[in-house]
Image (cartoon, helix red, strand yellow):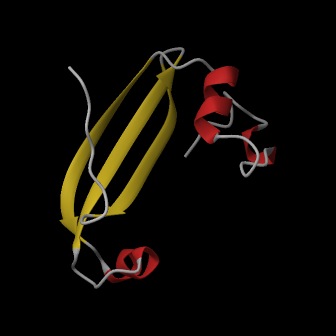
Amino acid sequence: WVDATKVPEFIEQDFSMVNTSDYLIAKSPLERGNYTIRALAAPDKIADALQIAPQSPTLVLRRQTYSAGRVLTFVKMWHAGDRYQFSGKL
């Protein structure tokens, strides 16, 4: 989800040619974000999309980004648990 009032031309972009994150940062600078990562069993539709067996382990990332004090984006991404890992630096 992208707040179209902050970036009205977003939907018109060809994102096979430009990265969505790069585009958003150029148009509406991000001031902060937050995310959570959960381990969940894959529902049937998600399992089908990820080409894994139903109820297989997944990692689900939910993220919100903010610009000018308002939510700019919200995303929920499902990842096959045996193919992904998340890491970061403190």
Q: Is residue 68 left or right of residue 53?
A: right
> Residue 66 versus residue 15: which sits nearer the camera?
15
Measured along the vertical axis of the image, is residue 65 above or below residue 16? above
Q: Is residue 8 left or right of residue 52?
A: right
Residue 56: give x, y in percent of width and height: 22, 77
Measured along the vertical axis of the image, is residue 22 above or below residue 62? above
Q: Quadrant of residue 89?
A: top left
Q: Is residue 82 left or right of residue 22?
A: left
Residue 43: give x, y in percent of width and height: 30, 77
Q: Where the C terminus falls, by quadrant?
A: top left
Query: Which residue occupies 72% across, 41% down?
Result: 18
**How many numbered marks have been drawn onto this rendered protein structure?**
0
Query: Which residue occupies 27% across, 73% down?
Result: 42
Q: Quadrant of residue 68?
A: top right
> Residue 7 versus residue 61: which sits nearer the camera?
61
Measured along the vertical axis of the image, is residue 25 above or below residue 44? above
Query: Which residue occupies 70% across, 23% down?
Result: 27
Query: Which residue occupies 26% across, 41% down?
Result: 36
> Residue 19 versus residue 6: which sits nearer the camera?
19
Residue 8: give x, y in percent of width and height: 75, 34
Residue 33: give x, y in percent of width and height: 39, 26
